[in-house]
Amino acid sequence: MNAIEVKNLSKFYKGDIRAVDNISFDVDEGIIFGFLGPNGAGKSSTIKMLITLTKITKGTARIFGVDIQKEPSKVRELIGYVPQEISADGSLTGYENLLLSAKLYDIPSKELKERIKNILDIMGLSERAKSLVTTYSGGMVRRLEIGQAMLHRPRLLFLDEPTIGLDPAGRKLVWEHIRKLNKEWNTTIFLTTHYMEEAEDLCDQIGIIDHGKISIIDSPEALKEKVGAGTITVTLDLENHPKDAKKYLASLLTGLAISISELSPQKWQFIVHNAPQNAPKILQLLNDNHIYIKDLEIKSPTIDDAFLKFTGTQLDEDSSKDNWKAVKQQRRTFKRLG
Amino acid sequence: MVSVVNFVKKTGVILEFEIRKIIHDPLELLVRMIQPILWLLVFGTMFNQYRIINTGNLSYISFLTPGVIAQSMLFTSIFYGIAITWDKDSGILAKLMATPTSRGSIVLGKALSAGVRGLAQSVVIILLAIPLGVTFVFEPLNLFGVIGIIILASTCFACLSIVFASLLRRRERFMGVIQLITMPLFFASNALYPVEAMPQLLQYVTKFNPLYYVVDALRSLLITNNLSNVPMNFVVLLLFTTFFVFAGIWGLKRLME
């Protein structure tokens, strides 16, 4: 059964703003699905429709076969959701936050304590359970929030930018927990992210959305294959060939390099099919012709390249930084108010 | 039937955790006590001494105390919308609304917690007024009535506040507008002076002011024990509250769009 089935889904806002424009896709049960797109591409609007927070303008969506427009409250029982913003209540303790979620998810009172204890153990928060959440680190808050969303063992978990603003160690820990939930509880996970590494390492399938439309959905490997070419960046000693080096290199590498460009004096970039295999040939050829290599970098295509290809923009570092700033700002206010 | 039970249960859960928050940080509650205390101690005792306002055979301080109870409750609950906007700007509200909890439970649970604050404040004001010479009617039935009125009224104003929050969205605008409407609500009521002292036009306006019915009921129940108007006060207030609870639910949904 598909965890998510979306057909011709649209969300329009006032003034004919098409946040989501007629998208269709399925997410298989049991996988980790990464939803990527530049800011304003329609990621949040899609999630907000799927978790029944905002009305669908057109189209249908089903969660494990349940129509989200017809039976929103049934859908809410099936899913867990962790927003990008901080959603644990700073003025309550970690334990109380979990207790609140447990009660709202109708967990029988006999099981309450056991389930909360279990989640605290899994998320590594047992020792701080009685402290107010304002005293938690960013990573702890995130783990608590994921714990809150997992108490009722949902079959599908929505994570909106789960590791935004976390330090690398905190991020790794959150990833570990996401993998564990996916493997051990067979929870289907739908996440959005700005981080390439996260998409590549964590996700079984990646969907790229741009301008409200789905550009492509595939596995990370297949996506990279579709991009095709990798790059070889070399710093060359071309003293023996001072005149028109570019032309010379082009004739030398005919059939191997798709394009050749000079990034800076002496620094060249070759775009090559199947870079890891063709690189030795190229290096050999250069060496045979007495062109000496001072520095070398070989890169296979990355998800970043795929993103560039399918959206025409770099996975915007800048806007992700802005986002991050906003979250940091929120964290500070959160501490102050809490 | 199941859904009614569930609705009551979830409302209770939301209310429980709002109360836990107050207990964790009672400072805000204490700070909010300062203003009504000043009204009573400074304004009340001064006006009482010089008999500036004619309140018939009641002393001015006795007349004023129910007004101050109503005022403190109004000033607390009318800012509830700001907490909702805060919950919305963080992810708290989104997460709450993604759980199987009806929107009605969320609005009503939060609004009822305003009633709990209102009750706590009222107790302090009453305890403070006794040494100032105010005699209260401490009949059990009257006290039940007072509790009912305070909870209804706090819920009413908290929901009104949620509606404004959803219409205005930005916190700065919200603060401005709320401050703009609170004083007229307060002054166009019988909290500080009898309605008969007002110009004719204003007397007419008070009939549309929920605070008027709150003060009238509290004064009857706590001070005069003349209960003839109380049922009418209850019914009108119940209508206002029901209307604003539904408007609040509408506002909550609107806030999420």
Image (cartoon, rainbow, N blue to C red):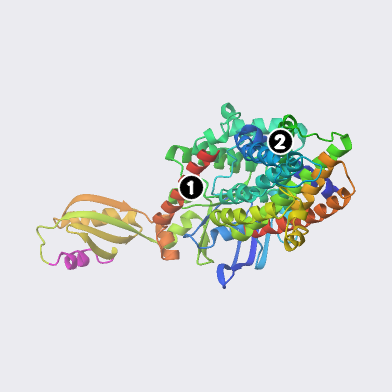
Return the residue nearer the eye: A235 or B70.
B70
Q: Is residue A96 left or right of residue A39?
A: right
Q: Which residue is mark 1?
A: A327
x and y percentages locating residue B107 in the rendered image: 71, 50
Q: Residue furthest front?
A: B50
Magenta part of the chain? A244-255
Return the residue nearer the eye: A57 or B24.
B24
Q: Quadrant of residue B115?
A: top right
Q: Which residue is mark 2?
A: B125
Name the element at disc 2.
Answer: helix
Instruction: Count neighbours of disc 2 (C-alpha within 10 A) and say few if under 14, some if 14 to 19, many if 20 or more.
Output: many
In reply to whether residue A249 is colored magenta, the answer given is yes
Mark carried by residue A208: none
x and y percentages locating residue A207 in the rendered image: 53, 59
Q: Give the position of the N terminus of chain A as an image quadrant.
A: bottom right
Q: Residue furthest top?
A: A127
x and y percentages locating residue A274 in the rendered image: 36, 58
